Image: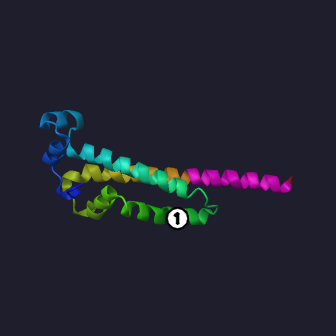
Amino acid sequence: MSKSLKDLKIFDIISAAEISRSKFFSFFGSINTILELVISEELIKCYQLISQNVIAIDSKELITVELKQLRTIYFRNNPILFDYYSNVNKLPDRYNVLKEAVALKERELYATTLASKIINLGSYQRAEKSTKYE
């Protein structure tokens, strides 16, 4: 947390974790792997919070708008995600695998959050219509 992702080196990680270089490489293989794990975990946490906050929305049109706004708020308040997204375009080419993996993970989380809300909204609206006619 004391360094930006673009300045982070394997030495920083092994020093903070107090593990050997060989142990780091045997567990993670590269810096991309550990950064992907950390960033993915933070993305999951943020999307869980977003999902909890869009539960009360009952309009398909507002869901997407609210998802985007909450994403901005939660990412801005998360130091890891804020740092990543602030510097993603400045990262060297060696981080291209990381950038692709994070983009894929976020698209998956966004689509899952949106789909589950729309499915729940559809179920709620069908149930509401059936009770109106009874």
Residue located 48% across and 54% down the image: 49
Q: Main secondary structure of the magenta part?
A: helix
Would residue 87 be counted in the magenta stretch? Answer: no
Query: Depth check: 64 or 38 in front?
Result: 38
Which residue sits furthest right? 134
Residue at 18% from the left image edge and 53% from the top image edge:
8
Instruction: Between residue 125 and residue 96, name the one nearer to us.
Output: 125
Q: Secondary structure at mark 1?
A: helix
Residue nearest the observer in this picture, 103 or 34: 34
* 49 on left or right of 105: right
Quadrant of the rendered structure where residue 80 is? bottom left
The total of numbered circles placed on residues is: 1
Q: How is the image coloured?
A: rainbow
Location of residue 66 with respect to 38 vertically, above or below: below
Using a 10 Å C-alpha cutoff, classify the residue at mark 1 as few (fewer than 14 neighbours), some (14 to 19) or many (20 or more). Answer: some
Q: Give the x, y percent position of residue 94.
A: 19, 51
Does the segment drawn in magenta span residue 121? yes
Q: Residue at x 59, y 66 (%)?
A: 61
Residue 85 location (% of width, % of height): 31, 61
Answer above or below: position of 19 versus 68: above
Q: Is residue 94 left or right of residue 108?
A: left
Q: Position of residue 128 (x, y in %)?
A: 75, 55
Depth check: 97 or 27 in front? 27
Numbered range of the magenta stretch: 116-133
The picture places residue 22, in percent across and down from the top left corner, at 13, 34
Q: What amino acid is found at the position of numbered circle 1 in the picture?
A: Glu
The residue wearing badge 1 is: 66
* The N terminus, quarter of image: bottom left
